[in-house]
Image (cartoon, rainbow, N blue to C red):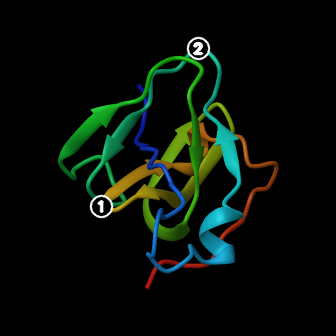
């Protein structure tokens, strides 16, 4: 069973718009576990609405992380959920961050 995730894009503003913040430009993308199509949810758990499903070979930005439902996946068992876009979450158990803990700030 695959879990949640989504990826937004951060485009630099054009023209006279204010410049993007350094934090927005420096967001690291992380690969989703090979061979998995991961579900992206509207919140940190499998009972939240399914927003979309990531394709094989996807990578995602992690803007912030929050605790939620415990999930077991290719990268272990965790209750950490990654916010990959506004209102979009995937379980960290399906994202290769290189850490068993938080790699981004906690979501507010």
> Which residue does the image show at 66% across and 70% down from the upper left?
104
Identify which residue is drawn at 47% across, 78% down: 107
Please say if 57 is above or below 107: above
Residue for badge 1 = 87
Task: Say few, some or many: other residues with alpha carbon within 10 Å of mark 2 (under 14 / 14 to 19 / 20 or more).
Answer: few
Question: Which residue is pictured at 48% across the width and 46% down the height?
Answer: 71
Residue 92 drawn at (x, y percent):
58, 50
Q: Give the mark toward the camera: 2 or 1.
A: 1
Question: Going by the image, does 86 lie left or right of 104?
Answer: left
SS at badge 2: loop
Q: Position of residue 19 (x, y in %)?
A: 56, 76
Q: Quadrant of the image for the C terminus?
A: bottom left
**Left of 5 or right of it: where is 12?**
right
- The reply, left or right, for residue 61 in relation to residue 90 is right
Measured along the vertical axis of the image, is residue 73 above or below residue 57? below
Name the residue furthest right. Answer: 98
Please name the residue shown 33% across and 54% down the image: 45
In this view, which residue lies farthest toward the bottom?
108
Residue 13 is situated, as x and y percent measured from the top left of the image, at 48, 64
58 to 60, vertically: above or below: above
Residue 84, horizontal then vertical, whole percent: 47, 54
| Mark 2 vs mark 1, CA separation in Å | 25 Å
Q: 71 or 84: which is nearer to us?
A: 84
Q: Which of 69 and 32 lies nearest the eye of the viewer? A: 32
């Amino acid at each position: 069973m695959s879990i949640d995730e989504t990826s937004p894009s951060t485009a630099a503003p054009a023209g006279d718009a204010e410049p993007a913040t350094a934090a927005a430009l420096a967001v690291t993308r992380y690969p989703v576990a090979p061979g998995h199509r991961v579900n992206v949810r509207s919140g940190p758990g499998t009972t939240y609405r399914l927003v979309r499903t990531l394709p094989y070979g996807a990578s995602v930005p992690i803007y912030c992380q929050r605790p939620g439902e415990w999930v077991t996946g290719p990268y272990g068992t965790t209750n950490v959920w990654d916010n990959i876009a506004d209102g979009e979450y995937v379980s960290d158990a399906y994202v290769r961050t290189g850490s068993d803990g938080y790699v981004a700030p906690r979501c507010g």
